[in-house]
Amino acid sequence: MGKDSGDAPMPDPNIKKAANAQAATGNAWLNFANDAYATAQDRQTGIDATAGAVSGAALGAQDTALTNAATDRARYENTFVPLQDQIINDAKNYDTPEAQAAAAAAAGADTQSAIAGQRAATERQQASMGVNPNSGRFQGTQRASDLNSALAVAGAKNDARETTRNTGQALRMNAVGLGAALPGQAMAGTQLGLGAGQAATGALTQANQQFLTSTAIPMQGYSGAMQGYAGQAATLGNLYNAQLSAYNAQNSANAANTAGLYSALGTGLGAAASFFSSEEVKTDKEEIPEGAALAAVDSLPVERWRYMPGIEDGGEHVGPYAEDMQRVTGLGDGKSIKVQDALGLTMRAVQDVSRKVDRIAQQVGLGAYPGNREVEAA
């Protein structure tokens, strides 16, 4: 009986392929993220171990530096601070009037002692040579010599005292200079210790940050998978909506065709019930065997019935059922009857009836219907 060319077209199969590809991509992304996360965890184990070792060494260096700093500070306060205090005291008291008077008295005493000693030595020498020490000439010469000798001795002694004092002062200054570096060393040690502690803290913080960063990998994977599933759902939803729209459009067209058929049968075919039927727009033409349409119409139950409320016009009509139409002729979707199919089937059945009547008329001697050329030719 021919193919039903009015059915809604099937959706493009590539839509389903695209939806499956979206879901597969999401799953692949999730698998990749899980593998990357597992690798990151393995690497994180080594990073944590290294960070722990570095932190332990840094904390040990911190403890050592702080201990050394405390030791150096104690030594500075116990050993070098007293020397500094002594130097300061010596500087304050070096040229006081009392110190100057003491130095002068010491110099005078040294001079008197030197003169007396020199005089005695000279007298002994002169006596041994037969010179009278009591002579005036000897006494004058002796006094000049004694004075020069005494001055030289006193100057030498004073110089020796001054040198000794200066040497002691210099030694104390050098000692103070050595100790002066200790506070800086202690401060540097403290800073070193604090820096080591900060480095240890930074290492642990960085290692922890690396771990937290690695946890974002599976999050991205899950997000990708969810996007893939969402894309699949959206695509399939659009596909379903397209199918539903096509189904609704088909039902509307079928309803319109059915209404047009019965409107044409009741009131005659009008312009509103017309449809394209030119031979130029048709293809896949196929001859219907004689008698087939009449047999099909004869097999179709035709009854009086009424539409359910809300369906079509809800009125009472006479006609076949779409299920029987599809079963007997193969036309339609089993839910509606197209106007073209019903009209064509009816017209072909009328032709079958016309030829059958003509043949019967010939057999009884009544002759064929004048317009039936096939019967006349027979």
Image: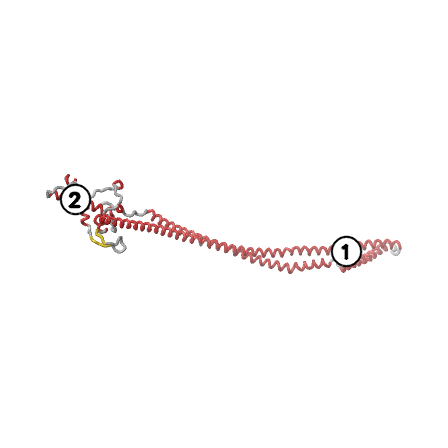
Residue 191 in view = yes
Q: Quadrant of residue 89?
A: bottom right
Q: Secondary structure at mark 1?
A: helix
Three-letter amino acid code of the residue under disc 1: Asn
With 153 as the anchor, is 373 left or right in this view?
A: left
Residue 225 x, y percent position in the rendering? 39, 52
Q: Foreground: 288 or 374?
A: 374
Q: Quadrant of residue 175?
A: bottom right
- Identify the residue position indicated by label 2 in the image: 354
**Residue 158 got which mark?**
1
Q: Residue 354, relative to residue 134: is it above or below? A: above
Q: Quadrant of residue 105?
A: bottom right
Q: Foreground: 47 or 14?
A: 14
Give the spatial CA distance, label 2 vs label 1: 169 Å
With 202 as the anchor, is 145 left or right in this view?
A: right
Three-letter amino acid code of the residue under disc 2: Ser
User: Furthest-right residue in view?
Assistant: 136
Q: How is the image coloured?
A: secondary structure
Residue 292 in view = no
Q: Secondary structure at mark 2?
A: helix
**Residue 290 got which mark?**
none
Residue 275 x, y percent position in the rendering? 26, 45
For discs 2 and 1, the disc positioned in front in the rendered view: 2
Residue 7 x, y percent position in the rendering? 27, 47
With 85 as the anchor, is 348 left or right in this view?
A: left
Which residue sits at x=21%, y=49%? Answer: 328
Which residue sits at x=26%, y=53%? Answer: 313
Residue 285 x, y percent position in the rendering? 24, 42
User: Furthest-top residue in view?
Assistant: 377
